[in-house]
Amino acid sequence: MFKVEKRILAVAMKVRILDTDYVVEDGEVRLRLFCKNDQEESILCVDEKFLPYFYAVPEDDVEGLKEKVEETNFSKDEEDLKISETEVKELKDNNKVIKALKIYTNIPASVTKLKNEIWDLPETKECREFDIPFYRRYMIDKNLRIGETYELKGKKQEADDFKRKIKLESIKQTSSQDRTFEWDTLAFDIEVYQDKIIMVSLFSENFKKLLTIEDIDREYSEVFENEKELLKEFRKVINSQDPDIITGYNTDEFDFKVLRERFEEHKISMDIGRNGERMKFNRRGRFAGARVKGRMHLDIYPFVTHVLAPGLESERLDLDSVAEELLGKRKDQMTWEEMKNSWKNKEDLEKFADYAVKDSQLAYELGEEIIPQIIELSRVTGLIPFDACRLTYGQLTENFLLREAHDRNIIAQNRPGREERSKRQRQTAYEGGFVYKPEPGLYENIATLDFRSLYPTVMVSHNISPETLNLEDCDERYKVEKLGYDFCQDRKGFFPELIQELVEDRYEIKEKMGKEDTEIDYNVLNSEQKAKKILANSFYGYLGYEGARWYSRECAETTTYLGRKYIEETIEKAEEAGFEVTYGDTDSLFIRKEGMGQKEIENFLNKINQDLPDFMELEFEGLFKRGFFTSTDSGEGAKKKYALIDEEGSMKITGFEQVRRDWSPIAKETQKKVLRKVLEDNVDDAVEITKETIEMLKEGEVPVEKLKIYTTLTKKPEEYDSTAPHVEAAKKAIKKGDKIEPETTVEYVITRKGKTISDKAKLVKYAEDYDPDYYIEKQIIPVTLRVLKVFGYTEGQLKGKGRQSGLSRFS
DNA sequence: CTTGACCGGGG
DNA sequence: GTGTACGGTCAAG
């Protein structure tokens, strides 16, 4: 006989998590996991059993503290602070084992208050781990990660906020991990005119739409009566498309901010969360992240600035530049002026619409490249992707450390207060990397070598870690005489252990990548190895970062000291082997020799690597046909400013002005052309190009686009204390009746009229002429002379052929 | 040389 | 939100 139950309550399923948060209901905390099951259904899973806690470290007697805490009734502002439970724990603290009292309370908000009360007790030495956000605490303690699959058991609950809701009983990782699944991703972008939203473009794998309020002849465009109707449709699209990931470029600081304003203005609520919740901003210091519950809103821009920027060539981090570098694709070229005119005059709206759609498409494609990296970084650090894409290097590292510390039964250090931070900041800087000063000039046939992950490998090789430093009790020490520090070698330190694991994992992954043939696996693995590289490289910086819990100036100082030692020794050995060293910086050196070939370089590398500690390695980076090194004003070799060219003619330029936005295009272009000519061993042509450019400037033949310099005004022009060209240019435009709001990018030109540079600065549209002298003296001469003075050229020679100055008017 | 103001991305 | 967290450049002092 079958026994049929009316309702089956118990459920078990395989899920992946995509977002977590908590709510407080009836004075009790409920941790929520937003999941998807293997049927791609959204599930809300609620854990009512996990309690917030922190630690109190006793002055001496932990049992005494326990008794005191248990018998006291704590309260703050007439609010009872409940202690749910206490427990004595043995934990590793630095190189010791201590006893600490683990104190549980009922709701997260009580932790801060209770911590203050308990820290005030005479029996308490200090409190620890009281500032870890509750959802992160949960993820750490339960060892949960986004991007992995879990087996969960629980009971089905009826709920009006979520279709499938489960009261959690247990959750554990599934024995086999499936990492080939994809998240539904939707990119969007808004266009604004006079503070109102005129277009919203949305793009995903199988969806492409432009919501707008003008009739535009495009099949993907849909027209609405007004902004309010458009916004309602935006909300509808998000909810019907129901994406796991919402992405875009600078959506925290722009799109979602504007959207919130406009939704408020029309008194409609932006409920686009999976449980019907509204979009809310999570403030974190200087920035606010737009949080959409149950989905991952991943803004690409902060991740680019915090994590990817150091590895990018481009100095500018706008969508156009980043997409060009990472995807080889650019935005449609349309200026802000053109967009405004198009909308104002209702001309070429199709072009504007195409531009808008292309923007969200580009954000989507950039997301395809970057989001896997964010997800993997989230998986490795154990943070939710929402955090992983917004936190800085130091914070990412710290969250990784918190999790790894927890796994090793290590109690976390406290974050430094204001006082401590500024004290750390005031300490005199320690010496950084070694830079070998080049002899200015042009060189043929240069090989570049570098130490693979110099600082991480130095830390592993010498067991550099805060808890191995200057121990009283230690058998074998690595002594750094010069600095007066020693590092215990008896057992592996916390930091070296983590670095070694990450580096070795990376090798393994890279090996696997060579074997795997499905594209998805390759991409996941590639993202994972990138994430591990990012982390492994972050520890040195972290140890010297004043906001770090595990701050250790001594460790950071020793790491750079040993880095210098190794590079200097290598330079010496290169010279002994008959190479000429032309340049070196921190972890790299440039060497050359008459008739030098691949083989000879390899032999040298092998010799060096034999003498290096196990974990360290000097690698071949590239062979260049020529290299150019410039000089400082005093004629000595300049550090960190050089250009290389390879056999194929591709240039690698470091440190020169040509990448920076505050130089006019004409100056940047000319410098690049001059560098190329020099690297082609054609200094005469380089000089000729300079002279020609100067002539063109004098004759007024240079178009305004090549002369404009741009900067963004972040406040109203009159609110600035200091004078700066872009501010003055804006002020003049206001006098002419222009309305210039904060946040506008001003494009200005230096004109003839006026005394100072600021006097002369005018907005492009009001500039009737330009000051050839300024562009020659302050732009062209400095950037070209930076290169050509090495060959004995002077300012006078470059200005040469003194012809009469023309009118320099824009025709 | 040190200090303080300013900017970034988006339209 | 178990909050209140950047980093680099440039002109002025």
Image (spheres, coloured by chain):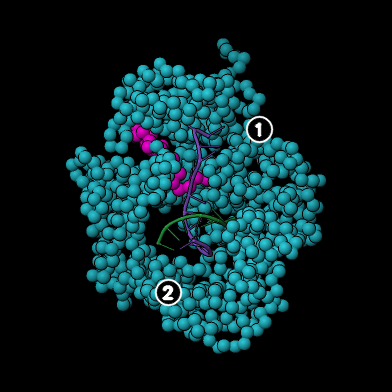
Chain colours: A cyan, B green, C purple
* Residue A75 rendering spot, x and y as whole percentages: 49, 21
Q: Which residues are magenta?
A: A390-413
User: Nearer the N terminus, badge 2 or badge 1?
Assistant: 1
Q: Residue furthest top?
A: A1
Measuring from the top left, give residue A501's x and y in whole percent.
35, 44
Residue A785 visible, this angle: yes
Residue at the limit of the structure toward the left, as seen here: A475
Check whether the beta carbons of the residues at disc 2 and disc 1 lie within 8 A of each other.
Answer: no
Q: Is residue A331 above or below residue A463?
A: below
From mark 2 to mark 1, how far is it between C-alphas? 63 Å
The image shows residue A809 at horizontal and vertical percentages of 69, 78
Query: For the point 37% across and 44% down, which residue is it?
Result: A551
On screen, residue A397 versus residue A199, left or right, reads: left
At x 32%, y 52%, the residue is A557
Secondary structure mostly seen in the magenta stretch: helix
The amino acid type of the residue labelled 1 equals: Gly
Kind of element beneath mark 2: loop
State which quarter of the image contains the N terminus of chain A.
top right
> Is A395 a magenta residue?
yes
User: Which x, y percent locates residue A644?
Assistant: 43, 71
Give me the residue at 38% from left, 25% from top: A121
Asked if residue A397 shows in the view, the reply is no
Circle 2 is placed at which residue position? A633
The residue that mark 1 highlights is: A276
Please say if A706 is above or below A267. Answer: below
